[in-house]
Amino acid sequence: MYALASDFDETLFFLNREEKISKSDINQIKLWQSNGQLFGICTGRPLSGIEDYLDELPDLDFIIVSNGALILNCYHEVIYEKCLKREIVEDIIEKYHNSYQLTIQANGDIYSFDEGVNMPINQIIIKDLNQINPRHYHGISIVTTNEVEAEKLTQELIKKYKFMISIFQNGKYVDIVSNKSSKGEAINFIKEALKIDVVAGIGDSYNDIPLLKACDVSFTFYNSPVFVKKQATYIVSSICESIEKLMSI
């Protein structure tokens, strides 16, 4: 059995296009699943960040959100969860909240201390961290002004926290999850849990590199960053094209 795991933003979903989710991609995904293969999402977004679009998608065989910190099966039941420690969340908020906009992913939702955080997902505004269940911190996203600043902040966080957390740059965003959590670790879990023979993955940004590395076959786009393209087996123009290649293997 084969499975294809797809990133969401700028891979399956395009915020700035009139057709945000391509009909040709959807039709090809349905054909893929009708042949007995699996399809799922592997995103840095929290669950609430994709729920509004699920009706436009075929039934998903698995859902990986928050950069691998939370995994759900085809019934939307949690089958894996790895959370940040509260003291880590508190420390990052204390050090960076005054310099950057940031959001906290927890319980499948996204929370912020600020109105109007520059992020294409609705946030729940809070005044105090105690308003969030302390056992379910899935991640933190820090919003910078550009990719260069995001890269600099990523390296700063890596030096400061070392093996305490996992850090991924995603365009101008810096995503933080628990140590050893990543899209790649999630793929390894899904492959074993669902008894998948071959897992393919497709993504477009730096936080997709663990996904591409963990997969048996991987895809990215012609306009992806050069380093991301170096990790992929194939360069394609769409999910539709990646499935066509998979079906010919």
Image (spheres, helix red, strand yellow):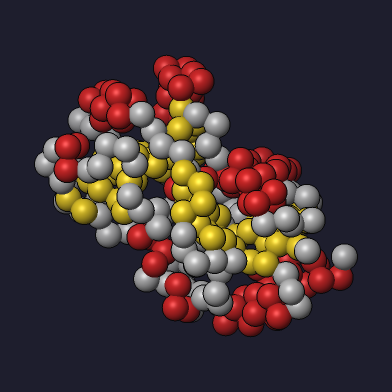
In the picture, measured across the screen, residue 4 lies left or right of residue 129, that is right
On screen, 244 above or below 231?
Answer: below
Residue 121 in percent (x, y) is at 32, 59
User: How many marks overall?
Assistant: 0
Residue 218 in percent (x, y) is at 73, 53
Residue 200: quarter of image: bottom right
Residue 54 in percent (x, y) is at 45, 72
In the picture, measured across the screen, residue 75 lies left or right of residue 39, that is left
In the picture, measured across the screen, residue 225 lies left or right of residue 246, that is left
Assign the C terminus to one quadrant of the image.
Answer: bottom right
Q: Residue at position x 12%, y 41% from top?
A: 127
Assign the N terminus to one quadrant of the image.
Answer: bottom right
On screen, 75 above or below 65?
Answer: below
Residue 40 versus residue 72: which sits nearer the camera? 72
Residue 146 versus residue 14: which sits nearer the camera? 14
Q: Residue at position x 17%, y 37% from top?
A: 130
Residue 26 in percent (x, y) is at 59, 78
Q: Please indicate, yes or no, whether residue 209 appears anywhere in the rendered image.
A: no
Residue 205 versus residue 33: which sits nearer the camera? 33
Q: Residue at position x 43%, y 24% from top?
A: 157
Q: Please indicate, yes or no, whether residue 14 appears anywhere in the rendered image.
A: yes
- Residue most extreme to the left: 127
- Residue most extreme to the right: 249
Q: Residue at position x 50%, y 57% from top?
A: 72
